[in-house]
């Protein structure tokens, strides 16, 4: 898998760079032939008809742009598939700073990852709703991750009365690498993982506790 991906990256780089250079060259030559008046009969270029050459340069330019757009589309799709494969299973580690030490959840424990920002209204409503239904989430490890600074995250946790809950953890993504791991950095976003470490559901936007519990309860009933 890694070898194939590296080969793809190498080929993408070649086509990408070739497309850019073809675009620049075509624009440069197009500019020269467009703005050069051929008045000297002894000039070698005077025997040439510039119109077909301009058409050829225009064709090369358009082709290079099309190839560039195709490469961009393929690259975006490949990265999306790669991230989807990574988040399909519970990560072995999270590259974020924990605001307090805690035992990283094992694959045998249901977990929910919340990506939020302390100033996001929908994130605030979501946290308040979770706080009101804490008893239903006692057996679930909840990890809240934000790109905000540590003090803002702590203040948010205290405001929502979630700072002293043993199954609620807080992490700071000050390096802004969350999207590299989970492929999305919109807030709020939620990832629900089952006891076997498999991704049950990914939500974007404010999510009600009932929607989160639905997938966790369905897994519990299936595992009986």
Image: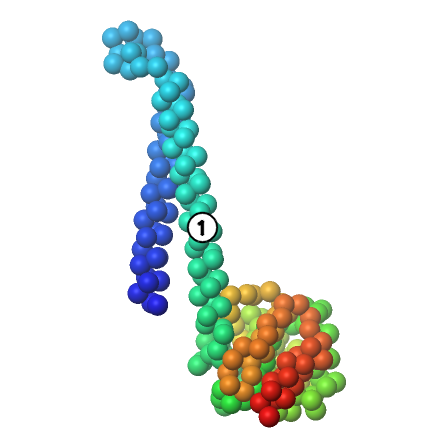
Q: Specify the quadrant of the image occupied by residue 68.
A: top left
**Residue in the image at 41% along x and 43% along y:** 67
Between residue 91 and residue 143, name the one nearer to us: 91
x%, y% of residue 107? 49, 86
**Residue in the image at 50% along x and 83% along y:** 197
Between residue 192 and residue 123, name the one nearer to us: 192
Q: In this view, does 76 lie above or below 131?
A: above
Residue 46 in view of the camera: yes
Residue 176 in view of the camera: no
Q: Quadrant of the N terminus?
A: bottom left
Between residue 189 and residue 223, name the one nearer to us: 223
Q: In which quarter of the image is the C terminus?
A: bottom right
x%, y% of residue 205? 66, 68
**Residue in the image at 36% along x and 17% along y:** 50
Q: What kind of element bears circle 1?
A: helix
Q: Specify the quadrant of the image occupied by residue 119.
A: bottom right
x%, y% of residue 105? 51, 87
- Horizontal side of 11 relative to 34 (left or right) equals left
**Residue in the image at 67% along x and 81% along y:** 214
Residue identified by numbered label 1: 72
């Amino acid at each position: 898998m890694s070898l194939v991906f590296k080969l793809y990256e190498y080929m993408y780089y070649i086509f990408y760079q070739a497309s850019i250079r073809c675009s620049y060259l075509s624009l440069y030559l197009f500019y020269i032939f467009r703005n050069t008046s051929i008045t000297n009969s002894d000039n070698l270029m005077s025997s040439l008809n510039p119109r077909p050459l301009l058409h050829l340069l225009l064709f090369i330019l358009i082709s290079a742009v099309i190839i560039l757009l195709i490469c961009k589309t393929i690259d975006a799709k490949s990265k999306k598939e790669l991230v989807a494969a990574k988040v399909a299973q519970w990560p072995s580690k999270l590259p974020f700073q924990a605001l307090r030490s805690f035992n990283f959840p094992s694959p045998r424990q249901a977990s929910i990852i919340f990506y939020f920002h302390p100033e996001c209204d929908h994130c605030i409503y979501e946290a308040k709703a979770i706080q009101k239904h804490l008893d239903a989430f006692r057996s679930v490890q909840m990890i809240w991750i934000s790109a905000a600074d540590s003090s803002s995250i702590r203040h948010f946790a205290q405001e929502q009365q979630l700072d002293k809950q043993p199954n609620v953890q807080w992490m700071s993504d000050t390096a802004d690498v969350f999207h590299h791991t989970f492929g999305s950095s919109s807030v709020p976003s939620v990832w629900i993982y089952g006891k076997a470490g498999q991704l049950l559901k990914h939500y974007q936007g404010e999510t009600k506790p009932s929607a989160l519990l639905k997938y966790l309860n369905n897994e519990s009933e299936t595992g009986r």
